[in-house]
Amino acid sequence: MSSNNSDSISNNIKVAQRVAICLIIAIPATYMIWFGGINDRDLSLKTSDWGGFGDFVGGILNPIVAFFAFYWLTKSVLYQKEELYETRIALIDSKDAQVDQARFQYIAAKLSALDVQLSVLQSDIENTQSQISYFVNAGLGAKLGFLGEFVDSKKELKKLIASLSQLHIQRSELQDRITSTLQQLNSEQYQILWLVN
C-alpha cells in the first residue's frame, strides 16, 4: 500500500473520530439547551428522569457509534484485502526472481565443472605430449618405460599419438559445451537483468 494511501486512511480515521466526538458532545448539549435554555426547565433530581435521559442519549449515540464501527471494520477488511493482494504479487515476483537466480547459479556451477574438466583434459594432453617427447628423444626400439618396464617405443608412440588425438577431440567437444553454456549463461543474465529493470 502506498504512503499516500496510508496517509489518506489516517486522515479519514482522524476525521471520523472528530465527528464521533462532536456528536457525543453535541447531542447531550442540544438536549440540555432545549430543556434548560429554551423551555426553561430545571434539572430533575429524580433518577428515573436521568434514566430516561440516558436512554435517549444512548438511543441516539449507539446507532451512530455502531455505524462508524461497521464502516471502519469494512474499510479495514478492504484495505487488508488490498494489502494481501499486493503481498501475493510481491511474493510471486520474488519467487520468480529466486527461480531465475537458482537457474543462473546452476548454469554457473555447470560452467565451473566444465572448466575443471577442461583443466584435467589439458593436463592429460600435456602429460601425453611429454611422454611422446620422451619416446621420440629416446629413439626407436625397446626402451625403458615410465613404470620401469621395457616397451617397444614404436608401438608406444602409436598408442600415445592415438590417445593424444582422442584427447584433442574430447577437448574440442568440451570447449563446444563450454561455449554453449556461456551463451546460455549470457542469455540467462540478459533475461534476469531485463526482468529486474
Image (cartoon, rainbow, N blue to C red):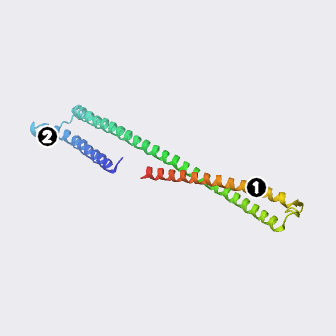
Residue in front for this viewpoint, 182 or 36: 182
Residue projecting furthest to the bottom = 137
Q: Earlier in the sequence, mark 1 or mark 2?
A: 2
Q: Position of residue 58 (x, y in %)?
A: 26, 34
Secondary element at image label 2 = helix
Q: Position of residue 37 (x, y in %)?
A: 11, 40
Residue 61 visible in the displayed image: yes
The crowd level at tag 2 (other Cα within 10 Å; few <14, some 14-19, many 20+) is: some
Q: Which mark is residue 33?
A: 2
Q: Which mark is residue 163?
A: 1
Residue 113 visible in the displayed image: no
The answer to which image quadrant residue 51 occupies is top left
**Number of numbered discs visible in the structure rendering:** 2
Residue at position x 18%, y 36% in the image: 44
Identify the amino acid type marked 1: Ser
Q: Position of residue 24 (x, y in %)?
A: 23, 41
Picture layout, residue 77 above or below residue 105: above
Residue at position x 80%, y 65% in the image: 136
Secondary element at image label 1 = helix
The answer to which image quadrant residue 139 occupies is bottom right
The crowd level at tag 1 (other Cα within 10 Å; few <14, some 14-19, many 20+) is: some
Mark 1 and 2 residues: CB-CB less than 8 Å, in contact?
no
Residue in front for this viewpoint, 59 or 91: 91
Apparent side of residue 129 relative to residue 103 in the rendered image (left or right): right
Residue at position x 29%, y 45% in the image: 13
Q: Position of residue 142 (x, y in %)?
A: 89, 62
